[in-house]
Image: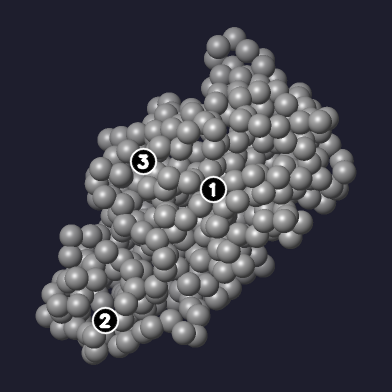
Amino acid sequence: MTARKQQLLKAHRRSKRLFLIAFLIVLVAAGFGLGWWLVPVLLVLAWGAHEAWFADHLFYRASDDYQYQFPGDTARQSVKLDGGVVHLSEPLAPGETLLLELQIKATWLGRWRDPYVELGNDRQDFERGVGGRRFLNLSGQAAALGENALTVRGRHCTLSSSGTLWVMSNPDYAQQRVMVIAPHADDAELAAFGLYSRGEKASIVTLTQGEIEAEDFQRLGLDKAQAARLKGRLRSWDSLSIPLWGGVPASRCVQLGYYCLQLPAMAEEPNTSFGSRESGENDVRTVRQHNPFDLPGDVDGAPTWINLVGDLRQLLEHFRPEVVVTPHPELDPHSDHVASTRALLEAIAASTWQPSTLLMYANHLHDNDRWPMGPAGGGIALPPAIEPLPTDRLWSPLLSADVQLDKAMALAMEHDLQGPLGFKRQLRRVIQQVLAGRRWPVTGSNEFFRKAVRRHELFWVRDL
């Protein structure tokens, strides 16, 4: 968590306390002046308003500009928005990843309903009350852009009359040898199902069992440790079997069996074993029996950083990937995700095989738990970057409707994304649907069915 986020969090909590004090004063005044029967009515209304409009976790101001820096040789040009159409100032530069930088400002209704921008047949949503620089993803819209025929229209928001179009050119990385690093089962599908399902030479490496937070399995009559072991086995099986739905055979999938939320501690004490926090296990070999070949960590099964880096080094030399897909260490704050990329970079430094490209993804964010915002099937606008990120180009391949459906079905197979929502979350969704106009897909109740099944996938490209 950054210092800036801490400051905003403190300010948010301070404002919330002041609001609660003021609200209590109003309640007492209403009780004395109009009758105490009004107090529970006001409490219910206030709770409903909170669930509809103030339950999102945004640790920045919606009026903040997004701070993106692209490589100096990135093609760009000024564009005009006239009559709801994007007009180019010069012929479109070659490149498949297109980003439109605009100023977006919410209308009064855009403080209560999610503002969004219609881009031809696409839709991309933004924060309620948005009022700053944002980056729309026009990837897949090159033909309409080149003909000055792409319509752009703000809903519950206004758009600046001019902007900057950024054009980035990349090879089709799906046609190269790709290795996907997944800290947990489901990370590969969330970030890169569309990518790996198009490649004939993809491999997937999952680092952890995913055994923690197994309370649902205790309903089977298991104690906490037994439930964690069962969940670890199931998610390990998911990591090896579900990629086959995307065309990746088990011979190209590996489960390393390390333990959730222990990777950062392992990194700080490389020779020390860090067993599971919940299952009681301390031997990674319990879930490695289906791996296609032996690894250095199989010798003693110790969950150590030394073994993890050694495993990854051997996997690099075995699969010889040209491209490695891994979490973005500055954008994705999950501690296991940050440590996974750290381990990968150490393995690359020690390996006799050197990939040429990193494709980095973000399945979680520091600042916004709803990104990508808006309904499933829409495009992926760039995420909040309130503090500047390292200068990277981007690659945003397009997913057809058929691939999006296959991706949703892959997520539906993940044990950790199954199961109904709790009552409070179901009620919150009903309130947000009625008052804020939000919609969720029918493919699954977990939030990742909305966030991950999109028109695009998005990767930050770093040459090695």
The vertical placement of 54 against 158, above or below, is: above
Mark 2: few/some/many CA within 10 Å (<14, 14-19, 20+): some
Mark in the foreground, 3 or 1:
1
Callout 1: SS: strand
**Mark 1 or mark 2: which comes first in sequence?**
2
Q: Residue at x 65, y 65 (%)?
A: 2
Q: Nearer the viewer, residue 352 or 373?
A: 352
Residue that numbered label 2 is attached to: 92
Which residue is painted at 31% across and 57% down in the image?
A: 398
Contact between marks 1 and 2 (CB within 8 A): the answer is: no
Q: Nearer the viewer, residue 119 or 399?
A: 399
User: Dot 3: what SS?
Assistant: helix
**Label 3: how many residues lie within 10 Å, few (<14), some (14-19) or many (20+)?**
many
Instruction: Say which quarter of the image contains residue 35.
Output: top left
Q: Quadrant of the C terminus?
A: bottom right
Looking at the image, residue 148 lies above or below residue 222:
below
- Disc 2 and disc 3 in contact, CB within 8 angstroms: no
**Residue 180, numbered circle:** 1
Q: Amino acid at mark 1?
A: Val
Q: Position of residue 209 (x, y in %)?
A: 63, 32
396 relative to 194, above or below: below
